[in-house]
Image (cartoon, rainbow, N blue to C red):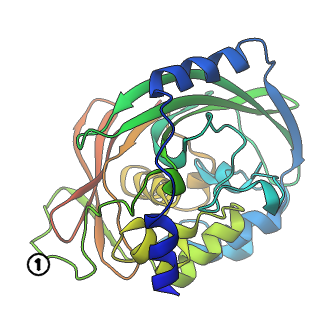
Amino acid sequence: MSRILRRLYSTASPASSISAADVAAQFLARYASTPPLIRKQYLDANQLQLLHHTLPSYSTHPVQDINPGSPIPAGHHLVYFTPSQPLSELAEDGTDTSYNPAPPFTRRMWAGGELEWVQGATMRAGEEAWEETEVKSAAAKRTRAGEDMVVVGVEKRFGNAGGLCMVDRRNWIFRPSLSSAGSVPKSNTIHAPPPTVPFPSGPKTLDLIQTPESLFRFSALTFNGHKIHYNREWCREVEGHRDLVVHGPLNLICLIDFWRTAVHCKGEAAGSLYPRRVQYRNTSPVYANEVYRVLLENETEKVIEARIVDSFGKTALIGTIEGF
């Protein structure tokens, strides 16, 4: 099978001559007159309970305490309002294509973003909530390796009968599709991991390891078909990764959960405690079955710096968390 995959993605036709700048401009023009997409959904308590069965054991929310009326912890909204495309409309790598630019820039990665909460507003399990999605930006960029890409900014606003509760701004990178690239992409890693190095130390640290099972569960909860999270052969033979890739949103949830337990109180009160703002940027992948570290450091007034680093010296995420 690996030979078939290599042949499929190494003999494809070359990428289209259309530039990233042209694709970005066309994408923005398409959405300039398009109203925001509004969806409503019942926030099922079972979905929240299943997420807590999936997260690391340090979670501050005992599974038996989740019921209608329980607050949706910060970041846990990511298991609601999931993609709804039929299988026939998914990209070749399994990703949702609802907000894809035109080909060949269709290979999506979650680059980072910003979460912002309304003070005093809380979404709760068992209630009806709404999501409003709007395209905010699209721009041509170039990777350090010289590859063209399109960066799309999408804003998602979440609320309930009481009004707006939070804003989730996401930046997605779209690179040329594998079938249009002309060859298998060169990997930033190798199948054998590099030598380990000592983790950086800090005042507040948490070591994590995700398993294929936890990645599969998170993909199921978020209805995420991206093959890099569950298909090891695709990861290695097509994408060039050394193993299954940990979801960026999963790391984001773990980061915010750790902030809540390490910086603020534990117990029931922690469930309704939200930061004011989280800004983050994903810089490198982390992989299944490899230990990595979450660090909270350099706290100034109500802002604390956050990092995720792997055991080989690479920084996977940088960001800040600001409290109210």
Q: Is residue 178 above or below residue 235?
A: above
Residue at left offset 81%, top offset 54%: 125
Residue drawn at (28%, 29%), measured in percent from left and top? 301
Q: Report the side of 267 relative to 20 (left or right).
A: right
Residue found at x 62% / y 59% = 268
* 183 lies above or below 100: below
Instruction: Locate residue 82, reporting x and y percent.
Output: 75, 52
Query: Observer-nearest residue: 176 or 180?
Result: 180
Neighbourhood count class around disc 1 (C-alpha, 10 Å): few under 14, some 14–19, many 20 upward? few
Report which quarter residue 67 is drawn in: bottom right
| Position in image of residue 173 (x %, y %) | 47, 40
Nearer to us in this view, 166 or 162: 166
Residue at far top of view: 33
Q: Is residue 278 visible?
A: yes
Q: Position of residue 318 (x, y in %)?
A: 30, 44
- Reading the image, the residue beneath label 1 is 195
Q: Amino acid at mark 1?
A: Pro
Using the rendered view, name the quadrant where residue 163 is placed. Answer: top right
Relative depth, front residue between 300 and 230: 230
